[in-house]
Image: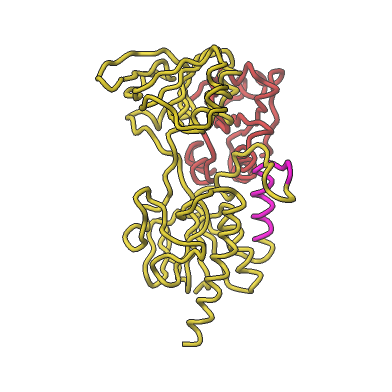
Amino acid sequence: MYDIIIVGAGPAGLTAAIYARRASKKVLVLEARSYGGQIINALDIENYPAAFHISGFEFATNAYEQAKELGAEFIFEKVIDITEDKKVITEKNTYQGKTIILATGFDKRKLNLPNEEELLGKGISYCATCDGSFYKKKTVAVVGGGTTALEDALYLSDIAAKVYLIHRKDSFKVSEDIKNNLQEKENIELIYNSNVTKLNATDYLESIEVTDNEGKSTTINVDGLFIAIGRIPETQNFAKIINLDNSGYIIAGENCHTNIPGIFTAGDNRTKKLRQLVTATSDGAIAATEAIKYISDESKK
Amino acid sequence: MEIIEVNQDNFEEEVLNTEGKVLVDFNANWCGPCKMLRPILEEVAKDSTVKIVSINIDDAEELASSYHVFSIPCLVLLENGKEINRSVGFRPKEEIEELIGGKK
């Protein structure tokens, strides 16, 4: 029996583990893939106090080593279900906790086209700063209409020969600064009111079919397509018992309490205004502290 | 087996001229997921008879391009010099062992 089972080993989950171990609780962290979460893709962290200019990888590794050294147990298994009586079920095992902290973060939103998955790394990418350098002097497209999509297009315009920016609406809801920067780039072509409807490939992506709101389709030859259409919180496996908002975020206030007593949430998968490294670690500390308080209150009953 | 660092100069000798399977890890210093993958590859290498080599793409741009590497980490499995499988992104140990065809 664990005092606290933490689902997800990103910055929120790792911080929760550190706080829980400092209070001598028996802690298990379950993670489906690697520790670190989204931050491992950050080349350089500039906005976290006292961790100026370190890579996301270093940040994650430091936090992971810290949690391990303090005595947190890590098991790399994917969690597929949780129960109200604090059982955590993975693909391989079931673990019993007194409390659970859900710190699963989010995943990239996909276009959901048939061959999208198999073309990952063969022309399809979800991370312009990670994969952009492979498209020197090539033709690429970015799909999306938010800040990430526009920043991706700007970043890629300095590397690629040509960048198409495809947006399903007729204007961008971003700051004027970014819009002005966009207009200055001669090699960015904007395609409004359109969706990417087909990926054409033999071994690698060769072209995309773009369909406008009136149903007219065009084929554009591209070497790469960067998908920047947002993110979805990884919360679907908990939806049976945990209340989610319309976008799938776990409904919880600053105290990180979910609708089930003893089950808490922390980090990017929680309903909140600002999703940053510093708010994720903050959530981790709060959720752990609330979990510790819950265990102590229950033991007095 | 130890992971062997490979570049343009010794690629032919270490990879193409190697009989049987070779797993090529395309990576870079600036790539976080690549650094997460490295210790896992080292563990796989300990228990496996498949030769594993590491290529820093910044030192071997032509190799990365000729193998159509568009995202890293990228693991390419070659058998007698021919590609037979690949995977992109971080992978846990079991999936890498599956990719190269099980443990020894």
Query: Does residue A140 show up?
Result: yes
Residue A9: percent from left, percent from top: 55, 54
Residue B23: percent from left, percent from top: 57, 31
Q: Determine the residue positioned at 40% across, 32% down.
A: A117
* A117 horizontally vs A162: left or right: left
Residue B28: percent from left, percent from top: 66, 31
Question: Any magenta on residue B82?
Answer: no
Relative height, residue B46 to residue A193 (above, below): below
Residue B11: percent from left, percent from top: 66, 21
* A247 horizontally vs A158: left or right: left
Q: Determine the residue positioned at 57% across, 22% down.
A: A181
In this picture, which residue range is highlighted in magenta?
Answer: A52-67
Total numbered badges shown on the rendered structure: 0
Question: Any magenta on residue A66?
Answer: yes
* A78 horizontally vs A136: left or right: left
Write down which chain is painted red: B
For the stretch drawn in magenta, the main secondary structure is helix
As rendered, which of A237 and B69 lies closer to the eye?
A: A237
As rendered, which of A285 and B97 lies closer to the eye?
A: A285
Give the colour scheme shown.
by chain
Q: Determine the residue positioned at 62% across, 20% down.
A: B17
Q: Which residue is the extreme one toward the left?
A: A215
